[in-house]
Image (cartoon, rainbow, N blue to C red):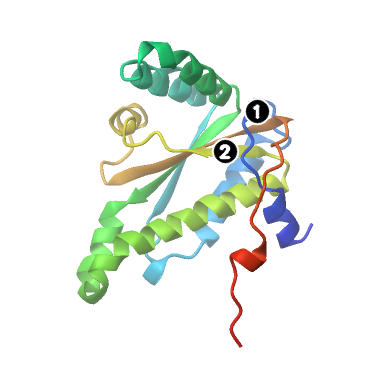
Amino acid sequence: MNYLEIINRRRSVYTLTDRLPISENELVGIVEETVVATPSPFNVQSGRAVILLGEQHKLLWDGIVYDTLKAIVPEGAFENTAAKLSGFAAGAGTILFLEDQDAVDGLKKRFPTYAAAFDGFAAHALGMIEVNVWNALAEQGVGANLQHYNPLIDDMVKSRWGIPASWTLASEMVFGGIARPADPIEKLPASERVRVIR
């Protein structure tokens, strides 16, 4: 499979199982290698990942996120929310993507001319980690989707898994075996999104 085939294979897969097509150790290795290989501004390397497997993954969705949203979502609307969370819990694991703000703040001090831009630069680099991991998992036949329940769950997540205070939660990538492929989606043609100037 070439790179374009891989990025076209990557989709948001929501119907997941806890049966992975690769071993947990292989998955961890893919995430580790991808995080290290992804570039960052001024080589700050501020992106972080925490991988939750098995019962820890289920605790995130059936416990922390469920309890947080149950307290704030109107009662009549919570049934749909609970069904969505149950779908996430059915997967094999979750990757928490975080930004080490201490590393970014250190960059601001070292390069004050660019200080105002470094939060954005770091966010771009973390986005590259997310999509690189997602593509690497797709290449192995692992389904995934990316969620954003932060900052609602940040404090409980940090407390439960001993995450440093300077690490800011950015997203939660749920992954697992693919029970049902993603539905087709419409995309704008390249002619409406890319301009070539000669």
On screen, residue 195 above or below 28? below
Q: Quadrant of the N terminus?
A: bottom right
On screen, residue 122 above or below 86? below
| Numbered label tally | 2
Where is residue 93? Give x, y as percent: 56, 31
Where is residue 161? Give x, y as percent: 37, 31
Say which residue label 2 marks: 145
Q: Which mark is residue 165?
A: none
Q: Is residue 159 left or right of residue 56?
A: left
Q: Is residue 164 left or right of residue 1?
A: left
Q: Is residue 164 left or right of residue 65?
A: left
Q: Quadrant of the C terminus?
A: bottom right
SS of the residue at dot 1? strand
Dot 1 crowding, Cα within 10 Å, few <14, some 14–19, many 20+: many
Residue 43 falls in which quadrant of the image? bottom left
Where is residue 142? Give x, y as percent: 68, 39
The residue shown at (33%, 51%) is 100
Looking at this view, is 74 or 53 the one in front?
Answer: 74
Q: Which mark is residue 16?
A: 1
Q: Are marks 2 and 1 in contact (CB under 8 Å)?
A: yes
Looking at this view, is 136 or 190 the one in front?
Answer: 190
The residue shown at (58%, 42%) is 28
- Of all residues shown, which one is farthest toward the bottom? 198
Residue 189 falls in which quadrant of the image? bottom right
